[in-house]
Amino acid sequence: MNSSPPQDELRTGPVGPRRPQLLVALGGRREEDAALVRAAHRHAQREGVHWLAVHVDNGRAGPRQRLALDQGLALVNRLGGEARILQGAGRARELHDYAMEQGVATLMVGRTRPSGWRFWRQPLAAQLLRYGGAYDVVVVAEARPRRRFRPVRGPHPLGWREGMVVAGSFLAAVAVAWALDFWLELANLSLIFLAAVLVSATLAGTRAAMINAALGFVAFNFLFTRPRFSLAMVEREQLLTVIFFLLVAVVVGQLAGSGRRRLMALRSSREQSHRLLSFSRALSVATDREQVRDVGVSTLERWLGVPVAFLDQDDTASGLVVRSAVPANARLGAQEEAAAAWSWQQRKPSGAGTATQSSLRWRFIPLVEQERMLGIVGLELAVRERPLGPDQETLVTTLTRQLGMALERTRLVAELGASRLSEENERLRSALLSSVSHDLRTPLASIIGSASSLRELEPQLSRADRRELLDGILAESERLNRYIQNLLDMTRLGHGSLKLERDWVAFDDLVTAALKRLGASLERVRIERDGADGLPLLYVHPALIEQALVNVIDNAVRFSPANGRVGIHARLDESGEWLEVRVTDQGPGIPPTQREAVFDMFFTGGEGDRGRHGSGLGLAICRGMLGAHGGSVEALPGQDGQGTAIVMRLPLTEQQESTRNGD
């Protein structure tokens, strides 16, 4: 009995990675791959399945085929699929094995047949059907029909480097073989010419190796077989030696040339991967749109060696403006500006090397992400001696795509930051209104009560009663004025516009004023004060430091039990440059993980802004007021681990030092 789970469970189960149900075989042909990818996208949307595009790399792909493959893979990513590249010599076998391994339900291939001299090979679909896999094979026609046999391309001229390698290796082989002719047998001499073929294949490629093999075949026959200096051969062993030499040279030259092509392709891929990785790292470090734009422009200019410009829409005027250019003196003409505007409107490339206004010196590439125009990249390709090759075209496409994604990332981050700031401002506004209403309710209630009593009961009140009510109104009004002034000072402090109106004041007077403001709220606890005698005068903003003391002492009173002890201890530190004020209570204490968070605005330990211990603004305002004077505040465990100690530190200025020394 087979206990393995069903195939559907393997693909759709919650455990393990999601497996594709549709596999697309890319062949490195632009039209065919585009038709395949779009057909796969439509099929996946219709059936609601996951799809994957695969290309089998056999190491023989040329630059144009790699460019077409990169474009196909980019289209796969844009349409929501995944892409894989497999290594192997047999395309049909690799596709079949991968499809069986992944358990796909459908394998989609193109209708292309082998062309040229490989006419005997079966189409890919027929080869897959011969393997008999447990999947459906779907054949998709190309977007445009093409001829079975491709036209013969014109011969690529032999470069000077290839010619030098062929000539040098061939002449060296002839010289060495001629020198060793009297020492070695004929079969051994052929190895010298075979070595020349290997050298040519390694240094210049397959074509140079084939030329060297042909020259070696002729020279070996003409110079070293009998009769000499003739292509005729009278001995059967010599004929076999020459024929075997030619066969081995052709095979070895092909293999060595193929290995060289793979090595060059690997080096090129590694170099391009290194460049893309460096570019991605530079873009990831950039924090805003301007930095991303400058990184993209400078990288394109450095790697392509052409002037690069970045154009964006002007906010104040209609049209495009050059935001960044390398070199800085790069300028666009009227025709180039018109082409850039056309690319912005149509969202298509224009200029040199494109189908639109190809006679221009510049090429303009629009950066489009999520149906949004992010900018135009301009490349002055006319300064190059040769047009961009397929590898460079791929590099330009990849770099501009990454630049567009980085610009979109910065835009989304900016919008998210603005949204968070707006949300935070709204939350702060609500919490501040709640706190202000809580702090101002008591004096307002006292003022309203005293004023209404004075108006309604004036005939029945004595002169002393009326004076007491008026004194209460005046005292509560002054208290209300101090609250409002402190809130305004805190607002200016948060915006960096608060001007500290310093004055000389005794610390004991600040403590006395703070305790007087707290009034009746101190009746439930015992206040202990020490250390205020002998301290130097403070050159501070008295109202702000007084408000800081009020907030800290009020916080200690709130958390202390009935008849608890609240201590106010002041002293100079060991260096004599700081005043240290320690306010202790006998409350439940603050957990170590929250001792820093209590100084954040609106932190109430989970109670919210309507908890019995306030809205969480007191200690935050205290830190801001002390910070404006260059001081600090921190929360520490209380004495013997009981309660909390809020330690405030204020620096002593030079004037304070001189005053203290003079006294």
Image (cartoon, rainbow, N blue to C red):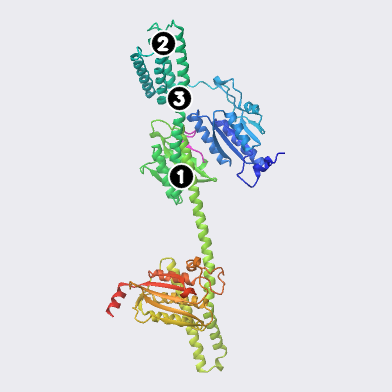
Q: Name the residue under label 3.
A: 257
Q: Which of marks 3 and 2 is nearer the N terminus?
A: 2
Examine the image and state in which quarter residue 499 appears. bottom left
Please indicate, yes or no, whether residue 498 appears anywhere in the rendered image: no
Relative to 503, residue 309 above or below = above
Front residue of 190 and 394: 190
Crowding around mark 3 (Cα neighbors within 10 Å: few <14, some 14 to 19, many 20+) is many
Q: Nearer the viewer, residue 70 or 574?
A: 574
The vertical placement of 477 against 107, above or below, is: below
**SS for dot 2:** helix
> In the rendering, at what x and y percent does residue 552 appear?
46, 75
Instruction: Specify the amino acid type for callout 3.
Output: Gly
Kind of residue at badge 2:
Asn
Q: Which of marks 2 and 1 is in front?
A: 2
Identify the main secondary structure in magenta: loop
Label 3 to label 2, Cα distance in Å?
A: 25 Å
How far is disc 1 from disc 3 in space, using C-alphas? 34 Å
Q: Answer yes or no: do the residues labelled 3 and 2 have beta carbons within 8 Å?
A: no
Residue at which label 1 appears = 280
Left or right: residue 5 versus residue 310 is right
